Image (cartoon, grey):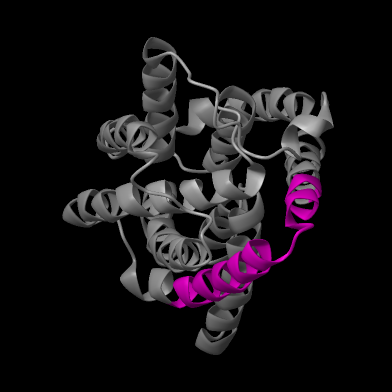
Amino acid sequence: MTELQTYIIAIIGGLIAGGINTLAGNGSAITLTILTEVLGLPGNIANGTNRIGIFTQCSATSWVFYKNGRLDIAKNKKYIIPIFIGAIAGAILAINVSNEQFRAVFKFMMVFMLLAVLVKPKRWLRETDLTFKPKWYIYIPLLFALGFYGGFIQMGMGVFFLIIMVLGMRFNIIESNALKSFVIGLYTLFVIAIFHYQGLIDWKLGGIMAIGQTTGGFLTARFASKNKWADQVAYYVLIIVLIGAIAKMFLF
């Protein structure tokens, strides 16, 4: 494979992943596969390298969502903090522990997530319930665990995030995606520092892939912020992503 072909694959794969991550999640399944199976990076280095594009993509999409009034950081800081703390703990574990055993059970978790998405679809198309006040002793441990998972492996983090925020915290799906982008971008900056310190990032490949991820995320966030039917598109994209991930893991 020539260097030019490597760049093209990285950018196109990143572009698709950036769009998927912004509306649903699990785009890292694409980028991690490219980094490991196509470009030949070891799993732990691919895990670190993938975070570069995630950070740039989330930074761009967060700005778009914020500019268009779909992201309220101050109002949601009680959700942001436990996720952030959990993510740092997960990243520290990730540089010392193999996640291969976890990947073995990941496919069964994806089946559970698909069922959660398909049951009562109207819950995914409602506006944020401003009257709902979740108990702190429920949402803090839950969001800490969510952040821990994101810091540890990242793949599928977006899907988990949407399920918890839409079904558990009663958020609108687009506002959940906006908050997801900000939170993941925030903790990913610190996760990158941890992986870089351990020498587990290929900055050249990560930077090239980030071009595609950022572009895909930016364009998709603009669409999601300005179209009334973006909720429905995000819901169906989420279903397609889950079905595709399950089919890949069980059949191939």
Left or right of 120? Residue 36 is left
Residue depicted at x 56% and y 59%: 31
Left or right of 61? Residue 85 is left
Q: Nearer the viewer, residue 68 or 115?
A: 68
The quarter of the picture where the N terminus appears is bottom right
Give the residues drawn in magenta, as a range.
208-236
- Relative to 204, does residue 161 appear above or below in the rendering? above
- Residue 168 placed where, x, y %? 58, 23
Residue depicted at x 43% and y 38%: 150
| Residue 1 visible, this angle | no
Q: Nearer the viewer, residue 227 or 6?
A: 227
- Residue 79 placed where, x, y %? 39, 33
Residue depicted at x 63% and y 50%: 174
The quarter of the picture where the C terminus appears is top right
Q: Which residue occupies the extreme left position in the image? A: 197
Q: Nearer the viewer, residue 196 or 43?
A: 196
Left or right of 84? Residue 105 is right
Left or right of 172? Residue 48 is left
| 227 in the magenta segment | yes
Q: Nearer the viewer, residue 186 or 251?
A: 186
| 25 in the magenta segment | no
| Residue 147 visible, this angle | yes
- Count of numbered badges drawn on the protein: 0
